[in-house]
Amino acid sequence: MSRSKKTRKVGENNPKLAPRTKKSERAPARKKQDSGNKAGSRQNPAAPKGQKRAGSDKQDIRLGSKKPVALDIVKEKVAQPKQPKLTDEQLLLQLEEDPRLNKLLDQLEEGRELAADDQQWLERQLAKIEKLMEKLGITDLDQADEAPSKGHSDDELLEKFESGAELLKQYQDN
């Protein structure tokens, strides 16, 4: 079978092309829309309408502000990190566990003389501890230590535990 080439001729049933219109009859083409700034606009920014730009009137927009930045404020913020608020009990424990306070109290017990500034610091710390103890309702350290120990002896606690076990068995049986 021999090969037949395709033709570009359109038959009678196929759609026909629209007739060509003259250039004068066509609708005018739109102007291409501008996108972005013109070339060199960074070096020569556009002046506001109605004004001509003088070279010395405006500063270069690429340069930043000449206003000085206060660096001492930044140092203060970095130097003072925020700490969570301590409860009275935590503050009291922190004051009592202070190594400087313990060292000065040991020196006083040994009968040594303290320097004036150490003595003042010690008095201030002890006053703070007393205020916190009054606020928490702790009257004396000796009484605070005796309060938990005034409970029961080991034998009494064992009897109380065993009676609790008996009550539990009674409850389960019922």
Image: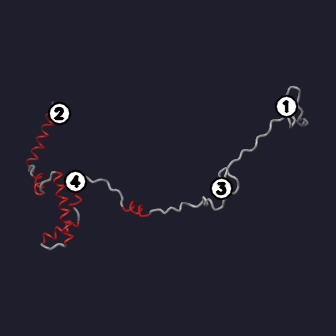
Residue located at (62% from left, 59% from top): 58
Residue under numbered circle 2: 172
Point out residue 61 in the picture as x, y percentages from the top left corner: 60, 58
Q: Quadrant of residue 113?
A: bottom left
State the colouring used for the structure image. Answer: secondary structure
Q: Foreground mark, 4 or 2?
A: 4
Residue under numbered circle 3: 45
Kind of residue at badge 1: Ala
Q: Tell me if residue 74 comes above or below residue 30 in the rendering.
A: below
Depth order, front residue of 105/163:
105
Q: Quadrant of the C terminus?
A: top left
Badge 3: residue crowd in 10 Å (few <14, some 14–19, many ≥20): few
Q: Quadrant of the N terminus?
A: top right
Residue under numbered circle 1: 18
Kind of residue at badge 4: Glu
Q: Tell me if residue 115 comes above or below residue 85 in the rendering.
A: below
The disc label shown at residue 89, or none:
4
The disc label shown at residue 61, or none:
none
Residue located at (39% from left, 60% from top): 77
Kind of residue at badge 3: Pro
Q: Tell me if residue 23 comes above or below residue 105 in the rendering.
A: above
State which tag comes first along the sequence, 1 or 4.
Answer: 1
Look at the numbered disc 2 and give the secondary structure of its residue: helix
Disc 2 from disc 1: Cα separation:
101 Å
Q: Foreground mark, 1 or 3?
A: 3
Badge 4: residue crowd in 10 Å (few <14, some 14–19, many ≥20): few
Q: Tell me if residue 72 comes above or below residue 112 in the rendering.
A: above
Disc 1 from disc 3: Cα separation:
49 Å
Disc 4 from disc 3: Cα separation:
66 Å
